Image (cartoon, coloured by chain):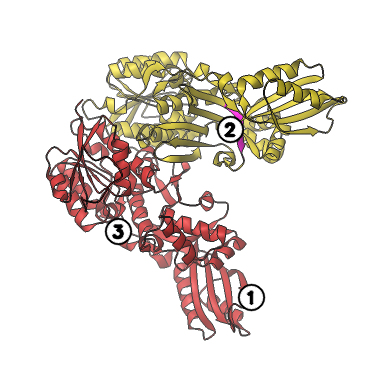
Chain colours: A red, B yellow
Amino acid sequence: MSKITVGILGLGTVGTGVVRLLADDPRFKIKWVAVRDTSKPREIDLSAIRMTDRPDELVDDPEVEIVIEVAGGIDRIYELIKRAVARGKHVVTANKELIARHGAEIFDLAHRNNVTVLFEAAVGGGIPLISTIQRGLQANEISSVAGILNGTTNYILTAMEQRGQSFEDALAEAQKLGIAEADPTNDVEAFDVAYKITILASLAFGRFVDSAKVIRQGITHITDLDIAMAPEFGYRIKLIGLARRGNGCLDVRAQSMLVPIHHPLASVEGANNAIFISGSAVGEVMLVGPGAGQMPTASAVVGDLINLASALRLPDFAPYFQPLIDSRESALCEIDDSEGTFYIRLETKDTPGVIGKLGLALGEHQVSLHSLLQRGVQREGSATIILLTHRTREGNLKRAIAAIEAQPTTIEVGLVLRVFE
Amino acid sequence: MSKITVGILGLGTVGTGVVRLLADDPRFKIKWVAVRDTSKPREIDLSAIRMTDRPDELVDDPEVEIVIEVAGGIDRIYELIKRAVARGKHVVTANKELIARHGAEIFDLAHRNNVTVLFEAAVGGGIPLISTIQRGLQANEISSVAGILNGTTNYILTAMEQRGQSFEDALAEAQKLGIAEADPTNDVEAFDVAYKITILASLAFGRFVDSAKVIRQGITHITDLDIAMAPEFGYRIKLIGLARRGNGCLDVRAQSMLVPIHHPLASVEGANNAIFISGSAVGEVMLVGPGAGQMPTASAVVGDLINLASALRLPDFAPYFQPLIDSRESALCEIDDSEGTFYIRLETKDTPGVIGKLGLALGEHQVSLHSLLQRGVQREGSATIILLTHRTREGNLKRAIAAIEAQPTTIEVGLVLRVFE
C-alpha cells in the first residue's frame, strides 16, 4: 500500500511527539513541517522532512492528504484549517479553542468537502474521551459529563493541599516545572476548561454550545485557607468542567467547586485528568489518565491519524466520522434559576452582632445556613467567617451576597464556591 | 433512509435490554427474536416482532442484515454465527467465550465474507474497553492490560471484606440478589475472567491467545481470614485479569491476587469493573464502570450496532472494523520463570520448631521471607501461619511449597496468592 502523505502545522512539544511516534511508521510519510522559525535547532531528526515558515506551502501541496495541526493559537490557524478543508484535505487537530469556537463552521465545511476533521487530542490529552462519547456510548442518552479537564490547575490545587502552599507559590513552582505557562491565564482562569467542556457538551448533547457563554470561575481566588477548610465540611476543591441537562436547557460550567470527598473526582491528583459520564443505559463510566504532556497528547493525535488512515481508501467514508451535532446553538440554563449549595468565605469587622446580621441577610433572600466556622482573628479588628448554605437558587444567593457586601461590618466577600453534585 | 433489519438470538436479560433500547429507534427494525421457549411470558412488547424457537429461520432470512447474539453458550451458537457470517450477515455479539475460543476462525471467516463481527459487550459490560484498545490507543505499544473484569466475584470479595462474611455466605447472598448464577463455577473459578483477558490480550498484543492456557485461579479458596489478613501486609485481595509483555512471551493470568492498597484497582468495589492500560505513549489510562447488568451490557451491544449502522452503506467498509490480530498464537510465558512475591497461608501442627523448618524449606529453594504472622491456635493442636515472601521465581516457590507440604508438621497449605505488580 502506498504511504499516506501528511503535513504537520507546528513543531512544539506535541508536534515533536507526533514526529517521534511517526518516525518508523510505514503507513505515513511526513512531507512538510510548518514552523515559525526554521533556523531553530530541533531535538529530532528532520532530514527527510521539508521545513517551511510558510504554512500555505503545506496546505496547498496537492500531495498532502492529511494536515495535522498541533500549532495552537487561533486566528491564523482557523484560516489555514478552512483552507486545508476547502482543498479536500482531512485534518487531525489538538486545538480545543479552534474546535470549541469554530467547530460548527469547520464541521459544516468538512461535510461539504467530504473530508474528516478529528480532534481526540483536544480534550483529555491521551484519554480517549471524544471517541468514548461519540462512539462507545452512543446507545445512551447522556445526562451529564463532569470532569477534571485541566492538569495544570489540578496540579496547583493538589500542591496547595499537600504542601500547604499558597496559590502564588504553587503556581510559581508549576511554572518552574513547565506544568504552567509563563502567562497562566488560560489555565487558571478556566478558559481552557471552558473550551474543553464546550466540546464535550456539544458532542454529548448533540448541539453546539457557545464557549463564551459557559459559566467560568478559575482558581485564582482560592487561598490556602479555603483548601484547608474544605475538608472540614467533607469536600476537596477542584476545577470542574460540568455539562448536564437542565429543564429544557443545558447547564455548562468551567468552575472551581467543592467536590464531596468520597466522589471519585475528589481523589484525582496532580496533573491527571478524569471524566465522569452518566448515560441512560450504561449508568456511570469514569475515565482517568494523563490529560496533557508530549507523548500522551501525541498518542491521541496519532490515534486519530491511524483511525483515519484505516478508512481513507474507502469511498465516501467521511460521513462516518462526522460528529452528529445540530448546528443550532444549545440554550444554556439561566444561572439564577439553578439550584445548589454554596461555600462562602468573607472577612468582617470583629464586632458583636456580625453573625446575626449575616444570618438576617441570608434569611431575607431565602438562603438558609448549613454551617458556619469562624476563624481566629487574622488581622487586627477583622475576622474570617466561612459559611456553607443549604440548597438554594443561585439568584437568591447572589442577592444575599450583595446584601452582605452592603453591610458596614463586611470588609470583603472573598470567595463563593458551588458544591459539585 | 431505509431501516436496517436485525434479528436477535436470545431474549434473556441482555436481549430484553437490547429490545428496550431499540424500541423507538427509527434506524432499526427488529424482525426476529429467536428464543428457546416461545410460550414463555415476556415483560416487553414483542407484538411487531416474529418469535421463533428455530434460530436458523432468523439466520437464513435474507432480509436480516445484522445478527445480534445475546444468547450465550457456545456449541450451537458457534455454528449459528458461522452460518450467519457465511450468509454475508454482520454480527454483534456479547459472547466472550465465543470470541475468546473461536475469535481467530470467526474473524477470518468474516474477513472472507466481507462482513463485520463486533463484540464490545463481551468484556467490561458497558465500559467501552474494546474500542479504547482497538482505536483510542492504537498509536501505542501496549505493555500491559490489567483489570477487575468480573463483577460477581468482586461483589463477593467486597462483601467478605465489608461484612466479614465467609465465601459461602457471600456467594449465597449474591445468588439471592441475582448477581451470581445458580451454578457459579464460571465466575468463581475465573473462567469468565480467563475468556475476557484472552480477548483483551489478543487485541492489545495483536496475536491470538489460547484461553485454555491462561493461568487461572479463582476465589473459592479465599477465606475471611485471608481477606482480613491482606490489609495487614498493605493489600486487598482482588480477582485480576492480567496480560503483559514478558521476555519474548506474554504473561496472561486470570488470578486472585493481593493488590497494593493504594493501587486504583484495590478500591474498585462491588459489581464494578475497572481496567488499567499501560501504553508506550499515553502512559497509564484507567476506565471504570458497570461491568455487567442488563442495560450497561445492552448499551455496549447497541453502541456496536449504531456504530456498524453508520458505516453499513459504505462499500467495502468491513476491513475498517476487522481486528488486527495475527492468526498465529502468542507464546505464553513459562509460569516457572516468572518472578513475583507471594502470600502463603498454611496450617501446621502446633509443635516447637515449625517456623524454623518452614524457613529452611523456603531457603533451600531460594525463597526468602518478607514477613510472617502466626494466628492464635484455631483448632486443637494446630496453628495457622501466614507468610509473605520476597521476590522469587515462581518455580522456586512451587518447589518450596512442595517441600513444606512434605514436612510431617504441615497439615495443609491452604492458599498461595501472587502479589499484583
Are dots 1 and 3 in contact, CB under 8 Å?
no
Instruction: Give how far across and how far down residue A421 sits, in percent.
Output: 50, 56
Find numbered disc 2 in the image and state the secondary structure of the residue it sits on. Answer: loop
Find numbered disc 1 in the image and state the secondary structure of the residue it sits on. Answer: loop
Which residue bears the numbered disc 1?
A376
Instruction: Give how far across and how far down residue B195 sits, in percent.
Output: 50, 23
Are dots 2 and 3 in contact, CB under 8 Å?
no
Give neighbour class at mark 1: few <14, some 14-19, many 20+ (Cα, 10 Å).
few
Mark identifier at residue B351: none
The answer to whether residue B377 is left or right of residue A278 is right
Magenta highlight range: B255-260
How many discs appear?
A: 3
Q: Specify whether residue B179 is in view.
A: no
Callout in the foreground (2, 3): 2
Q: Is residue A277 magenta?
A: no
| Snapshot quadrant of residue A287 | top left
Which residue bears the numbered disc 3?
A210
Kind of residue at badge 3? Asp
On the rendered image, what quadrant is the N terminus of chain A found in? top left
Instruction: Give how far across and how far down residue A392 sits, in percent.
Output: 51, 67
Kind of residue at badge 1? Gly
The answer to whether residue A71 is left or right of residue B35 is left
Q: CA distance from mark 1 to mark 2?
A: 48 Å
Which residue bears the numbered disc 2?
B420
Q: Chain of mark 2?
A: B
* Principal secondary structure, stretch drawn in magenta: strand
